[in-house]
Amino acid sequence: KKTKSSGRPTKSSAQDLHPDSVFVQFLKESGVTLRAGSTANEIAVDQVIFQKRLQQRLRKNPRFPNIIQEFISALETYIEDPERFRNCLLPCVPSSSSQQDTNSGSYQESLVRLLLGIEMLQTLIINILFEKLPEFMFEGVREDGLNVPRLIINQLKWLDRIVDGKDLSSKLMQMVSVAPVEIQRDIITSLPEILEDSQHGDTAKELNGLLQQNTQLAVPILDALSSLNLSSALLSEVREAVMGTLSAVQLEDLPVVVKFILHSISASGPNEVVCDLRKKLELEQCVLPAVLQASQSRMKSKAVSGNGQDSVALVLDVIKSAIRFQKTISEAWLKAIENVDESDDHKVVDLLVLFILHSTNANHSRRGAERVLKVKVRKGLIQESLLQKTFKGHAQVMRGYFPSILALAQGLLRSSDCCVVPFGGHMYKQAFTGFDSYCQQEVVGSLVTHACSGVSGEVDMALELLYELVSQRPAEMSQFTVFVKGILDYMDNLTSQQIRRLFHLLSHLAFGQEQHGGHIQDDMHIVIRKQLSSMVPKYKRIGIIGAVMMVGSMGACRYTVCWYIFRLYTLSRLLVRSCSESSPEAAALYYDELANLLQTCKLDLLVQVLCLDFLMTLYVCACLSPFVFPASVMYNLDDDESQGGIAINLLPLMTQDQQPKTDTTQPAGVKKERRVSPLCLSPFFRLLRLCEEVQHQGDLEEIDALLGCPLILTDMEKVESLSKAEREFLCSLLFYTINWFREVVNAFCKLNDPEMKMKVVTRIQNITYLQSLLQTCLAGTRDHPEKESEKEKEKDAKSGVSLSSYWPFFRELDVEALSVLQCGLLSRTLLDTELHSKLKEEVQLGPAELLFMLEDMWRKLDFSLASAPAKKAPFLKSKTDRAVGFAHLQQKNAKEIATCCMELLPTLCTHLENCHNHFQTLLSEHQGVVDAPGVDVKEQQLMCSAYQLLLQVLHTTFSGSVSAQTSYLLLVGNFQCNHLYVVFYMLRHAFEYLQNFRSTVPSLNTALCLTQLLIVLSQYGGSNHRTYREQISDCLQKHFLLRWLLLFISEDVCINLVFCCSIYLEHTDDVLKAVEEIAGEGVPELMNAAKDANSRSWPTLNRQTFLVYYKSMMAELERAVRKIPPSKQMDSQESEKLLTWNLAVRDFHILINLVKMFDSRPVLTVCLKYGRLFLESFLKLGMPLLDYSFKKHKEDVQSLLKTFQLSTRQLHYMCGHSKIRQDTGLTNHVPALKKSLEQFVYRVKAMLTLNHCQEAFWLGNLKNRDLKESDSDERNNGQEESDESD
């Protein structure tokens, strides 16, 4: 038979070239017409009909199944032509002459895919495709845009059924092993669309092995693995393998790897995966070196420099996506960061993830990020260096998280914890430095808000940050001058130091050398003139401080016109001079501020000369006069002739100052003499001294006569005979005299001449003596109620008052004055008129002088190194300024003060040894009795206070972070060897040195200070921390054996005893054993002793201190059981934990039974409170242990429960007692305790049911009894309680 013509003469068909081909003939009969050239093959029927017809023709052919091989051979012959093979891979088109165009669909499959849909041909067709694929591997993309290898792979996708999936998977992986990289990627990414689910596991294993060999294929492999259906075990294995290749993955592939790891985490175990990911994710390596960064920033080549940052940004986006949609992952990240215990182990990714967590909308993530960051900063684990590294390397990435960075910085700066506030400041600085102008504006606006908040610590830090930004980046800050100027509207809430800092930064911005903020000069002039012209002292003070700071900023500029400086200085001088007569406080403040300016700033020479000339005139005419006044000349340290007969006219000045301001007796035409207040005396002298130091390079020879010159005073010892007004006058005179001597000590304390040192020490002796007089005088000026008897008034006057509340009224001692502590025994030889030795004079610091210097030193250290948390003032209550009295100290930073203290450390140790020797001698002479007859009580009290202050000074010095770093540098600065060994050696030596003082501590307060100092030193012990804990415990135990520590029972002593007991129980090796020793041995000894007696084994335990011991034991026992690890089934430490709980329950039972003998209300309150807490801990941690160990240790569990049952019954009796007494302080604890008691009953029943022993449980009515366990049937309220039988 002859085949019919196709009837299409205009198109050439492939059948003409192969008329006898089985392949061509069968296709034509089934409905597909092959075309030659670039013309697509045509299909005349539906695809399913075509496949069905072709399959029927092959099966019904007489040569079946050999006809299949002939068909395939004809196909191979046909596709030898590349063009015909391309046509077979491309989709067919519907035949134009077909009548079924509407049924055939708009898209037709390719001829190869139609043949792959026939099962009997599929395997053979796949073999042909894999044989043809190598021919086109290296051709790439053709001119017509077709990629033949990709077309071949696409034929295998989404087949309805795969006959031999295992063989197909094997062939695909074989092809991957030999194909080029591009084709490998195409094959791998197509695997999920080609293979059936049954082959996903084996394929995943092979891809996992391939990933270990070739990390270039990481992205396609991970894409394929993400789409494969894998078991959890296999997915975990693959994830671990991928995690191992994380460090070798290319930077651009890192986001895909991280995405796969995070998306493959199951809900059961994300913590370990995230922790491992955090350890291996090294974003620090994604930062280019500084040289390349600088070159790229100059070239502005985003295509190169942005590559690493873009990859980091994509990684963070992946993490952010996982955190946002999976709560378990966010919690895992928080826990992973929280578990880092060393500062060196923290990475850049930690900070970035915290910013991501804070940026999410979930409240738990935001609060968690804030909490973790605060904890890490407080512990010093996340430091400024890490923050700086993060901003320096990833500023472009962090710009997207700027709102979170700003919010976190605000929270840290507003925190009441002073340890985290500086880190918030660092975040502000880094954000201002690394981000654009919009972010800079937000930073400045936020800092201005902080500065106007009214919270002292927050305002201080904000102003300090603004000043640093103005000093370091004046050009950028000049754009936001208007924002900073707005703080001037809120100066009412600022302290003097804050006002000083505000005007300093504004003056620096307005009058700096470049004058970036010059447009606010007129505004500052207006504000200062307005404040100076005000008659309100508060605003006048602001104007004086502002004017002086503006003078300093202008005077420090070497390029400013001198006449402008002179005009401003003259204006401020005239304004202050005009108000000084009516307001001596303003004049004194002006000279103090000018003195601070001379001390801290380098002024222009013209300004210095003007200051010196003006002050010399005022000081000589107002303060010094010839020695002609007919009054008592006192405190003269020199011969009158040698010093020209000068004296300080303090008494005449005070007398003149007390006279009325308006004197009508002044003759007409006579110039009124200018009146100078004695309040200006000390400020005048301080400014004069600083001018002399500036002009003569520290030489004070011109004014050294003022150190030993006398003062014109009056007899101040006979206070009893004076009236109240006279006593008030005398108090003022004493204040002025003490302040004069304080400034004299400040001026001459740095001189090295022995004679001058003797005079300085003598002036300190004068100060301590005058302060004792002032105490007596102040007691006599206090107002007494009319009902108070004269005898009580006399007693109050003799006892004196404390000067601590008057501390702000004394002149401040400089830090340099602490060098007086280094003075030992000073002596000089006095000569007669013939220059022969007449007398030898010796001077040294006595107990009173030592105590005076140590009190001042401790106040300085407590203010600078142990800053109190910033808190808002209570509503409608005045806010006390903590900085009052430390104006000079605030000019120095904490590091400078810590360095000064470390230099004085040998001197402090010498004084500490002297105190130790004093009390050691006292104890040896009086057989261990410190209050024996004949002991100088006053001297003993002074030495005891000095002993305690020395330990407090050392504790404050070593406890601050800044001082700790300074001491570390000083210790190892001269060593070039292993510095850690040096530190540990010095630490051990210091610890042993301080332990030697424990035998002579004169009071419980001193013992507590010594213990706290030892604890601070032990914190730097590293691995030896446990050894130090044992030594601290032994030291405290020996303190408890010193009965004379409690000679005077007071509220402060009881508070310190609480701290000592808590520290002892906290540092002892076995808390339960220590509690049993005190409660089981010491307390019974106390009960058997006399009423006022002490326990024999614990001499500090008596009936007055029993509550202290009892509260400490209950609190530490409850804290100890909370530290017992929770139990699990098949726990290897089950026996040890059960034994620990047995000991704890026994101690608890002993403590509960003590209430029968000590049934006071405070003891009952402690018992109810901590009894409930112990019961809750037992239900949470102890009962699960009993669930698992009941079968193995039945007798131990029953014994524990029976002992604990006795305690719960006693707690029930206490609840009934509290209700009968109707004491609200006790009944407030009853509901929660009753609830816990009921939970205990049912929890025991559940434990017995779990172990199939429910028949051992029965309920009964518990009678209501009193604390002595006597029956009270009339109040018989039933209470269910458990009782276990054997």
Image (cartoon, rainbow, N blue to C red):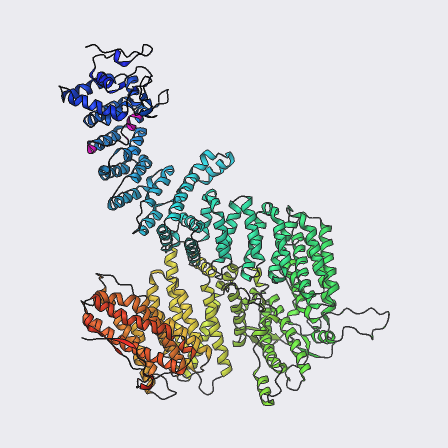
Q: How many marks?
A: 0
The range drawn in magenta is: 151-166
Across and down, in percent, residue 840 comes to 57, 76
Q: Main secondary structure of the magenta part?
A: loop
Across and down, in percent, residue 277 comes to 34, 47
Question: Is residue 697 magenta-colored?
Answer: no
Across and down, in percent, residue 385 comes to 45, 50
Please tell me whether residue 338 is drawn above or below residue 292 in the rendered image.
below
Tell me what residue is drawn at x 30 percent, y 14 percent: 36
Which quadrant is the N terminus positioned in?
Answer: top left
Q: Would residue 269 be found to the left or right of residue 595 on screen?
A: left
Closer to us: 1140 or 74: 74
Closer to us: 822 or 712: 712
Is residue 1026 visible from the viewing direction of this image? Answer: yes
Please tell me whether residue 685 is drawn above or below residue 37 in the rendered image.
below
Question: Is residue 152 magenta-colored?
Answer: yes
Across and down, in percent, residue 698 comes to 62, 60
Q: Where is residue 722, by image quadrant?
A: bottom right
Which quadrant is the C terminus positioned in?
Answer: bottom left
Please tell me whether residue 1048 is drawn above or below residue 978 in the rendered image.
below
Tell me what residue is drawn at x 76 percent, y 75 percent: 660
Is residue 1002 visible from the viewing direction of this image? Answer: no
Please tell me whether residue 170 is drawn above or below residue 654 in the rendered image.
above
Tell me what residue is drawn at x 49 percent, y 76 percent: 945
Q: Would residue 655 be found to the left or right of residue 261 on screen?
A: right
Q: Residue furthest right?
A: 669
Q: Would residue 644 be found to the left or right of residue 921 on screen?
A: right
Closer to us: 120 or 1081: 120
